[in-house]
Structure formats: structure tokens, C-alpha cells
Image (cartoon, grey):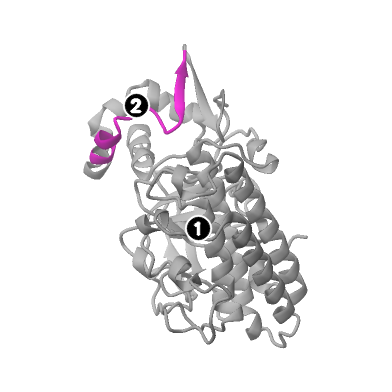
Amino acid sequence: MNFSFRTATSNELAIGLRDAREYTLELFECHAAEGLDSAARVPVLPHINPPLWELGRIAWFAEWYILRDAQSSDPVAAQRNSLLTKGDDWFDANTVPHAARWKLELPSRGALKTYCHEVLDRVLDKLGRAKSDAALYPYRLALAHEDMRGEALAQSLQTLGVGAPLQLSRNTMPSWAQGEIRFPGGTIQMGSRRDAGFVFDNEKWEHACYVPAFTMDSTLVSNAQFGDFVEDGGYQKPQYWTSAGRAWLMARERSAPRDWMRDGRRWRIERFGTQVALAPNEPVRHISLYEAQAYCAWAGRRLPTEAEWEYAAQSGHAALRWGDLWEWTCTPFEPYPGFSAGAWREYSEPAFVSHQAVRGASFATRLRLRSPKFRNFCLPGRDDLFIGFRTCAL
């Protein structure tokens, strides 16, 4: 069933919440099958969580905003206690630092799965009594959160080299002929309308933005194109890298993208724990902003601005393809005019300026979450995301 979580009805939300929980548990079991459900065997890495903690946090988040009627993420905002005696002590991300999540004495796998089922049952029962569209806001928020964390769990499988569900591990990108599209430019409305249903706080609110004429690739940069940069010694030529990019590169001693391995004169890559031949026509993935910038400098191109990306995505141009991978833009992640934090207070505001605006979606993004208005964001050095880039003419 294809619907947007932003305007989902109560019946659609019930279907979506059940589907999201089933998928969350499937991803969790992929970790558990390799003994990675507890923190003891999971390395402390900056952009993943112990899967058992992630599972509990997802259910706790829904309990917090729906069953406990919290109007914000302030630690004292909940109107009633958690079903778990120490739920807030374990799963409130505002009060449990990332590194501390490996040291918690969490309930067993079975106990947390029981908690997940109990929360979902109660959420669905309460959803059946929701009488207005405004009352659906916390359910839409919880569904979006679980879908986003589901993609994070999929990224964790890739990072840890663990086999993934078939819909992920068998995913192959289509081949295409890349071309350029000339957009005439003009004024667009960036951000979301006040009557658009659910809106993330970083999309508030719709405002006019003038975009000059520009020329953009119709598709993302491919493995073959990026491979030409690699073979030309692009990682060894500092003139293509920003100062921050050079520092990032020196810290990692890279000569090719993450997970690329030479096999004679060809390249192989690792996909969810399995080595496969590098497909030349697929978009290059697991690329940091610094690598994308270096490629652009080498190719005599540039990254699109966030406004250009949204203009193109909303143009309806038949040749433009997006949604296979997240895409870097050259725009720092900043608030729109009139920004105010939403109920999930820490979602956007702490990332302003330090993070980069990322647009699109990936093969691991649920369809109901995809929107040309959705503003993703991440630190410039991250390359664990399912992320690539396209270029624009200078």
C-alpha cells in the first residue's frame, strides 16, 4: 500500500506502524543472527548504536509521544510513566550519551521484543480512538522515526558486514544513459505549506526562493565515472581537495572509496558482508562530501545547491531520476526563515551549520517517507550512508 506518512489516515497509519515494526524486527534479527544483538560484540563506532538499544529506543519513542502524551522531548514532558521501570534511563537519547549505550544493563532480547509488541498493541488501540487529523500528529511522527531508524539499522548491517534482508541485499541499481538537463531557473517555494499535513521542523515554512538558470546531470555520478577519478590518482592529488578534505583523507589513508578493493585490474566492493564485482553503471555510493567535492574539482563541475536540487526534483522533467541514493548538496544545513523547533526538539537544531544539506532518498528509504521536500542532513565526513552525488555545470 503506497501512501505518504505525512497525510496518512488512521487506517493507513495502522498499516504503516505494523509494517514498520515487522521490518524493524527483521533487521534486528539479522544482527542477532551474527551475535550482534548485545553491545558486547558491537564495536563502538560513532554512527551506529548497539542493535538491542536501537530496538528499545524505537519502541520507547512511540511510547513517549503517543502513550505518554509528551508534547516535546523535554525529559519532564511525559504525562505518565513508561511500561519499563527504567525505560527513560535506558532510552532517552537526550540523557544517555552515545558512548554510554554500550555500558547499559538492558533487558534481554526477549523482554525488549515483548515491550515492542506491548507498545505497538497499545498504540494501535489508542489510534483507533483518534478523532481528528491533529490527533494523528504523534502517530505520523512515530512512523517517520521508525522508518528512519530502520534505514539506520540497514546502514549498520552494511557497516558491520552483516547479511541483510533480501529486499536490500538483492537490490541492484538500474543502468541508464546520463545526460544533462538545462533548467531555466525562476522562483520556487521552498519548505512546506502550513496545510501540508505532517511537517518536519526544518521544513518550516514555505518561502519564495529565486534559482538562477543551471545545468544539472540527469542521474548520479556512476562507479565508472568516479573510477576514472581514482585511476587518475585523484586521491593523491591535494589540489582537488579542500583543507578539511585533506585532513579527512590523511586520517583515513584512502586511495579509493570506502569498501572498494582491487582485484587485479578490476575493483570489487563489499555489500552486506559479501564481495561482488563493482558494477560500472551503478551510482557510486558511500561517498563523503569531501570525496564528492574532490571529484567535482577534478571534473570541472560543482555540486548543486539545495535550492537547485529541489527545483529540479519538483520540475517533473522526465529525464531526471532521484531516489536511488541520498545526494550531497553544496549547501550547509541551516534553518529556514521563521524556524521553530518541533516536538522532537533535538531533531534538527543541533545539526544546523555543522552538518550539510542532503536531499533525495535511497533504496533503503521507505516509499512513504520519500518527498522532494524532505531535508536530510549529515556531517561532511560521513561515508557510511547510502549516499552519492550528481554534478552541475560551472
Residue corresponding to mark 2:
255
Amino acid at the residue labelled 2: Ser
Q: Disc 1 on helix, strand or loop? A: helix
Q: Report x, y in % for residue 378.
A: 40, 54
- Asked whether residue 12 is drawn in magenta, I would say no
On screen, residue 145 versus residue 252, left or right, reads right
The magenta segment:
247-263
Looking at the rendered image, the disc whose residue lies closer to the viewer, 1 or 2, is: 1
Asked if residue 322 lies left or right of residue 50, the reply is right
Q: Residues within 10 Å of mark 1 (few under 14, many from 20)?
A: many
Q: Label 2's element?
A: loop
- Which quarter of the rendered picture does the C terminus lie within? top left
The residue type indicated by label 1 comes to: Trp
Q: CA distance from mark 1 to mark 2?
A: 35 Å
Relative horizontal placement of residue 362, taking residue 15 as reference (left or right): left
> Residue 76, position in %: x, y?
43, 83
Residue at image coords 59%, 70%: 142
Q: Which residue is mark 1?
A: 53
Q: Earlier in the sequence, mark 1 or mark 2?
A: 1
Q: Please state which of residues 238 and 265 is positioned toward the viewer in this rendering.
A: 265
Confirm whether residue 108 shows in the render: yes
Instruction: Decide which of 254, 32 is in the foreground and name it.
Output: 32
Closer-to-camera residue (376/314): 376
